[in-house]
Amino acid sequence: MKKRIFVAVSAILVICVLLTFLGALVIPKYTDNKEGALVGEYYAEAGGHDVLFIGDCEVYESIVPAVLWEKYGINSYVRGSAQQLVWQSYYLLEDTLRYEKPKAVVYNVMALKYGEPQREEYNRMTIDGMKWSSSKVGAINASMTEEESFVEYVFPLLRFHSRITALTADDLKYAFETPKVSHNGYLMQTGIVPRTDFSEGFSEDDYIFSENAIKYLDMMREKCEDNGIEFILMKAPTNLWRYWWHDEWETQVVEYADKYDLKYYNFIPLEKEIGIDWNTDTYDKGAHLNVYGAEKFTEYFGAILADEFSLPDRRADTALSEAWDVRLEKYYYERNNGGK
C-alpha cells in the first residue's frame, strides 16, 4: 500500500515538474514586446526603495529612477505594466510589501476608468511575471475574463500548447530567465515622432468610476495607511485624444484626494512649466513620453517628492551609490545608442 502511494505521489510530482518546464518553454518570452517582461524584473532588485511607482504605461514610460537618483539621491522603482488595471495595481502593491516597505507609493490614476476585466493579453503581461503568492492568486481571480481559467495560469502549457510547434531558440534560452529590458522598471524609448493632433477626446457613455475601481483604490490607500506609507496620486502629463483625461474624471479624483487628505498631482496643465516639447519629447505622436520628455518630467516631479515628502538623499550610502553607478552606466549607454 505504501509503495503504491509512493509511486502515485512520485508520478504526480514528475508530471507537475514536466508541466512546469513545458509551461516555461511555451509561455511568451516578451523579447520583442518588452512590456510583458517588466513585472518579473522587479524581484532581482527588490528591497530598499524609498518610493514605488505603480500603474500603467504612464508610469513605466514617464518615470526615470535614474534621474531621481542622480538629481535627488532618491532610490526608487517602477512597478508598471501595460494597461495595468487598478486591482492589479493593488495586488502588485501587496506583493511588493512582502519584500520591502517604501516611504511613499505613487499611483497613476488613468486606469480608474476601467471597472471590469479587459483583455487576456494585458492580464498576462502583468500577472505572468508575478511570483506565486496569495497576491498573484488574488490578481488572477480579480482579472480573469470570462474566457480565461485559473488552471491555465497555474499551468501555462494548457494555454500556450499551440506554441510547441513554433518554438524558437529564444524560448529554450530564456525559459527561466529573460534578458533585462528596463532600468528599475523604466522602459526607455528613444524615438522621436512629434505630436501633430491636439484635438480633444471623444465623449464617454458614463464618466462615473465604478464601485469596483474605487474599492481597489480604497484597498491601496488602506494598505499604505496600515504600513505607514505615504499614498500619492498622480496623472502623467500626456493627454492625447485616444487616451483623454476627462474633466469629469479629474473632479472625482480631486474629491477622493480631498476626502482622504491625499496629495494629488495632475501634471497635464503643467506641461509647459515642466518643459515638455511635443515636437521632441514623444515617440508616438503624443500618446507617451520618450526618454527626453520622461527625464524632464521626472526631474520636475522629483523636486516635489524630495521637498514635500522628505524622501532621503541616499547618495552618501557607499554600497547603494556603487550599485547605482553600474545602473547609470547601462542607462546612459542605452540612451546614447538609440535604445540598443
Image (cartoon, rainbow, N blue to C red):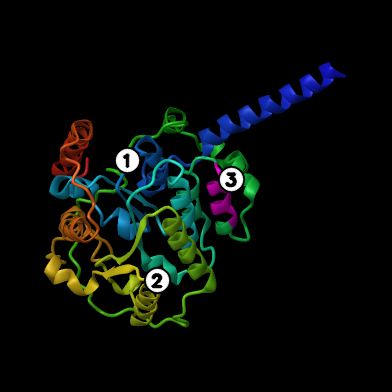
Quadrant in which residue 282 is drawn: bottom left
Residue 277 visible in the displayed image: no
Q: As shown in the figure, which amino acid type bears the numbered disc 2?
A: Tyr
Q: Dominant secondary structure of the magenta stretch?
A: helix
Q: Specify start and end residues of the magenta stretch as a single range.
A: 133-141
Q: As shown in the figure, which amino acid type bears the numbered disc 1?
A: Gly
- Number of the front mark, 3 or 2: 2
* Circle 1 SS class: loop
The residue tagged 2 is 260
> Toward the viewer: 48 or 165?
48
> Toward the viewer: 337 or 229?
229
- Residue 116: percent from the left, percent from the top? 54, 67
The residue tagged 1 is 48
Residue beneath the point at 75% across and 25% down: 9
The numbered mark at residue 37 is none
Q: Residues within 10 Å of mark 2 (few under 14, many from 20)?
A: few
* Circle 2 SS class: loop
Mark-to-mark CA distance, 1 and 3: 30 Å
